[in-house]
Amino acid sequence: MDAEAVIEIRGLTNRFGTTVVHEDLSLDVMRGEVLGVVGASGSGKSVLLRSIVGLQTPSAGQITMLGTDVLGASAADRAAASARTGVMFQDGALFSALTVRENVEAPMRERLAVDAPTRAALADLRISMVGLPPEAGDLYPAELSGGMRKRAGLARALSLDPEILFLDEPTAGLDPIGASAFDALLNSLGEALGLTVFLVTHDLDTLQATCDRIAVLAQRRVLVTGTMAEMREVDDPWVQSYFHGPRAHAALGQEAV
Ligand SMILES: Nc1ncnc2c1ncn2[C@@H]1O[C@H](COP(=O)(O)OP(=O)(O)OP(=O)(O)O)[C@@H](O)[C@H]1O
């Protein structure tokens, strides 16, 4: 793996009124890695993701993404950096009045100077890459199953051929078979496209199946980073109960003790 950090976060603070979600948080995301971000509910995983992609303005700190100081850059430079990323939100966040193909085309309309037939062909390519049948392009989000909606959300996140993919709870709401199919898809796409993936999840099976490294959010910062095996040695009550609980043992294929 290349040792270049594609995201560098330093001294990040996020405050909502008197609630301090992050304080002096630092984190590096390395090119080509799949980083799983875990933490108790309310620990600020989504706020962290939203801060990096520019949907949340932090109270303090510095975020450098693909060499751009995202909090200090001009709007044009921020937009250029953001065009090199893709985001898939938990519910897919698809436009309900647009077909799947039109949803996947939406980011291209803003950023790519290509004619309509080329745009549609590029969208169809993304649709097939995520394992949806060709006819899914003509369907509306309401006509899709939960698993298909996730794949459509992923196809849209891949619209601009991103270097960094942000995923917020991609397997939430999927049955175990659908979830492990999504994990396999993520692995094969990650490898084929050389993606860096920032993955917020509660799903231990997904962590085990897809992540090179895990970052634990606790006490308003990144408490620890490491591999799944290293997480099991961390001396912290939340990390211990998360990575030694029955679900963790199941994910690791071990007997619960
Ligand atoms: N726009 C906002 N205004 C006020 N408070 C907010 C806002 N967004 C998030 N918060 C608060 O920030 C904290 C962290 O929220 P966040 O959604 O990042 O947690 P999370 O770790 O992703 O949780 P979960 O695992 O339950 O999704 C919560 O206390 C939440 O209420």
Image (spheres, rainbow, N blue to C red):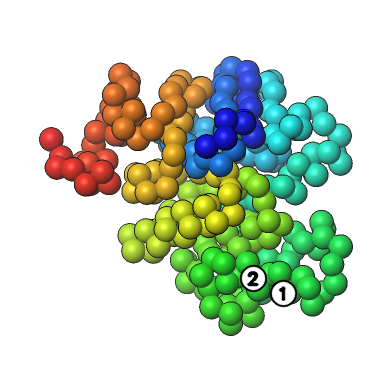
Closer to the camera, 32 or 242? 32
Q: CA distance from mark 1 to mark 2?
A: 6 Å
**Residue drawn at the location 86% of the way across and 34% of the way down:** 74
**Residue drawn at the location 41% of the way across and 29% of the way down:** 226
The yes-or-no answer for disc 2 within 8 Å of ligand 1 is no
Judged left or right of residue 170, residue 164 is right
Of all residues, the one furthest to the front in this rendering is 2
> Where is residue 196 shown, x and y percent of the image?
57, 43
Residue corresponding to mark 2: 125
Q: Is residue 45 above or below residue 192?
A: above
Residue corresponding to mark 1: 121
Closer to the camera, 195 or 65? 195
Label 1 secondary element: helix
Cβ–Cβ under 8 Å for marks 1 and 2: yes
Kind of residue indicated by mark 2:
Leu
Q: Is residue 131 above or below residue 174?
A: below
| Picture quarter with the C terminus | top left
Closer to the camera, 223 or 197? 197
Badge 2: how crowded within 10 Å, few (<14), some, or many (20+)? some
Label 2 secondary element: helix
Q: Which mark is residue 180?
A: none
Kind of residue indicated by mark 1:
Ala
> Where is residue 189 shown, x and y percent of the image?
53, 57
Q: Is residue 153 visible?
A: yes
Closer to the camera, 164 or 13? 164
**Residue drawn at the location 80% of the way across and 44% of the way down:** 80
Q: Is residue 92 visible?
A: no
Badge 1: how crowded within 10 Å, few (<14), some, or many (20+)? few
> Where is residue 69 shown, x and y percent of the image?
76, 29
